[in-house]
Image (tube, rainbow, N blue to C red):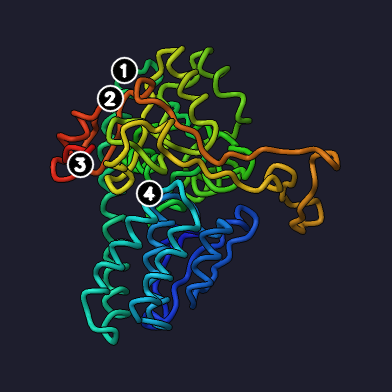
Amino acid sequence: MKVDGKHYRTISVRDGGAAVEVIDQTRLPHEFTLVRLITLDDAVRAIADMIVRGAPLIGATGAHGLALALREDATDDGARRAADRLIATRPTAVNLRWAVEEVYATAMGLPPGDRAAAALRRAEEICDEDVAMCAAIGEYGKGILREIASKHHAGRVDVLTHCNAGWLATVDYGTALAPIYKAHDAGIPVHVWVDETRPRNQGASLTAWELLQHGVPHTVIADNAGGHLMQHGNVDVCIVGSDRTTRTGDVCNKIGTYLKALAAHDNLIPFYAALPGTTIDWALTDGVAGIPIEERSEDEVRFMRGRVAGGDCVTVEILAPGCKAANPGFDVTPARLITGIITERGVAKATAASLARLYPEMAKPLIK
């Protein structure tokens, strides 16, 4: 996608593979800054501190992080230690483990001297595959938005989304926002209600910023406003992303998604999750019981970052000293609340059978 008219991917190889460059998402929307990752430690820090975030981009960064690590230590023990460190940084998103293990498997079948180059090639392939998958998700989702627009008396489609599942969460295009970009570019009138997404405000800071860059009409709303808008007929469809989806269609996404799905269900509003096949955890059948939910620092609730009148970006405390805060990073929306899952292979119902039809090579029977 473009920033000030220039095309960017969220992660790009530099210096022949000696470094990768990423967008520092902790500084958006007020500062657009690129960060260079050179070592394994750099990649681990970028993922853990949410300089990069979003399941597909976390996976891509993990893949490149292992490639960088193999430039330093390509021994069997060094490679395994590096892979394990990367995987441990964010436990909820399944893409990270998948991408790191993909690169690890590719490299470890070779002599140590050839491993770094092979890892870099596979990491780049993972990035290119992600772009292609997100573009395909956008096309299938565009069809849904076109159909809604054709039935709407005003022609405009009002979409509600939660958190950021745009190009900043992937390598390009995005998942939940890909259908919106494709529809907008095709001339389908689209307006997006952007949940602020406390406590890190990825909707207000990231989704709104990238929609603004692309010229898509949007309005930022407080997280608690979505149900009210649905009750009053101001939302036609909800589209969210996913950090992990079970083989049975339970969707794990940013905290607060479950509440939006409940409100959509109560108001008969279609609720879709958009995600690539790499986000499906084929070993899980119960998302609520089986998906590990990351408990993040209470400081994310305690403090907020913003820009003051003079232009400086500052961090302020919003809780009284001594107050405790809980900060679960994700929640799980049961399959029964989901209208459909938009993938790069088509739109599936949120059922084991429907997902299996799209991914027959992955949907093997579980061994109990």
Left or right, 300 with respect to 14, comes to right
Q: What's the CA distance linking mark 3 and mark 1? A: 25 Å
Q: Secondary structure at mark 1?
A: helix
Q: Residues within 10 Å of mark 2 (few under 14, many from 20)?
A: few
- Which residue is situated farthest in the front direction here? 368
Sooner in the amino-acid sequence: mark 1 or mark 4? 4
Sooner in the amino-acid sequence: mark 2 or mark 3? 2
Q: Secondary structure at mark 3?
A: loop
Q: What's the CA distance linking mark 4 and mark 2? A: 32 Å
Report the amino acid beneath label 1: Lys
Q: What's the CA distance linking mark 2 and mark 3? A: 19 Å
Q: What's the CA distance linking mark 4 and mark 3? A: 19 Å
Q: What's the CA distance linking mark 1 and mark 4? A: 37 Å
Sooner in the amino-acid sequence: mark 4 or mark 2? 4
Quadrant placement of the C terminus? top left
Q: Residues within 10 Å of mark 4 (few under 14, many from 20)?
A: many
Quadrant placement of the N terminus? bottom left
Q: Which residue is mark 2?
A: 147
Residue depicted at 54% across the width and 68% down the height: 34
Task: Say which of 16 and 229 sits in front.
Answer: 16
Q: Which residue is mark 4?
A: 94
Q: Secondary structure at mark 2?
A: helix
Q: Residues within 10 Å of mark 3 (few under 14, many from 20)?
A: some
Which image quarter: residue 182? top left
Q: Which residue is mark 1?
A: 151
Q: Which residue is mark 3?
A: 345
Q: Position of residue 273 (x, y in %)?
A: 37, 34
